[in-house]
Image (cartoon, grey):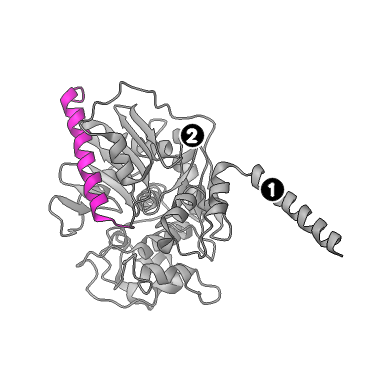
Amino acid sequence: MKKWILGIVVVVAIALGITWFSMDKDMRNLAANLPTNTDVLFWSIPQRDAGFRAMDRLPVLAKSNIIDAGDTVYPMPKGEPLKIDTDVDAYMKTQRTAGLVIVQDGKIRLEKYGLDFDGNGKWTSFSVAKSLTSTMVGAAVKDGYIKSLQDKVTDYIPEMKGSAYDDVTIEQLLTMTSGIKWNEDYEDKKSDVALFATHKPEPGIDVTVSYMRKLPREAPAGTKWVYKTGETNLIGVLVSKATKKQLSAYLSEKVWAPFGMEQDASWLLGSTGHEISGCCIQASTRDFARFGLFMLGGAKVGGQAILPDDWIANATTKRADIGVPGRGYGYQWWTYDDGSFAAQGIFGQGIFIDPKRKLVIASNSNWPRATDEPSQLGRAAFYKAVQAAVDAEGAWK
């Protein structure tokens, strides 16, 4: 009997050993730091280090859809190293940066990686995805699926009728000025942003629609800006309903494949099958930089714009006052009064775009906290240092 039990133990140990050594380094790291719950906001730093690069590979967290890349890759040749007046390695260590790609005038001026990450890996976007989602609204307008940004949300999501969203337009969703009450505190387990991730929807109702249609109004529509991830998820549902396409498939069709992204990306799904459009695109840092170049070039594919003529100007300039001097909010883009704009996600994800300097800075990180203030200030200072380095060359003028 003891020999039989010992034999079983040996077989199991061998099987586990074979499985372990057949894994790549990211999956081994994830197995060694496996999260004990599905709430990303409350993972430890080692769990996030492991999980952020492999969230689409752990179905227990969420299923995902592939965002297919095409057969050709948009070129980003290497240029001369940019002489930045700061210690980039020290900056990346302080930021806990996994990937940093700086492209200026179409050339890679700096590319560095940390946290045992590299250019072949994919890192989750968090709210960087919001800016990609809003771009799909523009594509849907151009394609005629959405008639006007002044249309009501309920025109496209009839399940929202009878809720506080009856008076809310698509444009107010895009600018987060719906006037609906929402709590986006990432460290409060009772906040909306935490609770709606585990919400159990009514039968036959999308999980986002189910949660959002129960929220109360706190201000007249169009009068108050409040950052709401749930509303970007609602935008994703709206685009899917309008186009009758999965959001991931539409992004692949309009941008990812024809523009020339290097790798397939993936988009995590909510419990009822729609993409979590306020979050969770898994892509390489270089491909996030390519999306910045796509915007910088006027959102054109093969010389043809996929967005309405005035879309980028409207989307990337201040449409709502966020109470920060020199800053604002557009159509799911953070705006700067100097004409630059950015997609930003918690824990240090970002795509910074400066049209005047033909500059894109893509970065993926794992800050100590979701909205860590020292890290935010450090990143803002780094952006300015990069802009100063480009100005010192004078080549962009």
Question: Which residue is at 56% across, 57% downward?
Answer: 63
Amino acid under label 1? Gly
Instruction: Provide the residue span drawn in magenta.
Output: 370-397
Rendered location of residue 94, percent (x, y): 30, 45
Q: Quadrant of the N terminus?
A: bottom right
Q: Is residue 222 above or below residue 243?
A: below
Tell me if 358 is positioned left or right of 272 in this view. Answer: left
Residue drawn where x is 26% and y is 70% of the image:
179
Q: Nearer the viewer, residue 182 or 56?
A: 56
Q: Position of residue 237 (x, y in %)?
A: 45, 61
* The C terminus: image quadrant: top left
Mark 2 lies on residue: 262
In the rendered view, tell whether residue 93 sits above or below residue 55: above
What residue is disc 1 on? 17
Q: Is residue 214 left or right of residue 1?
A: left
- Give the Cα separation between the discs numbered 1 and 2: 33 Å
Q: Amino acid at mark 2?
A: Glu
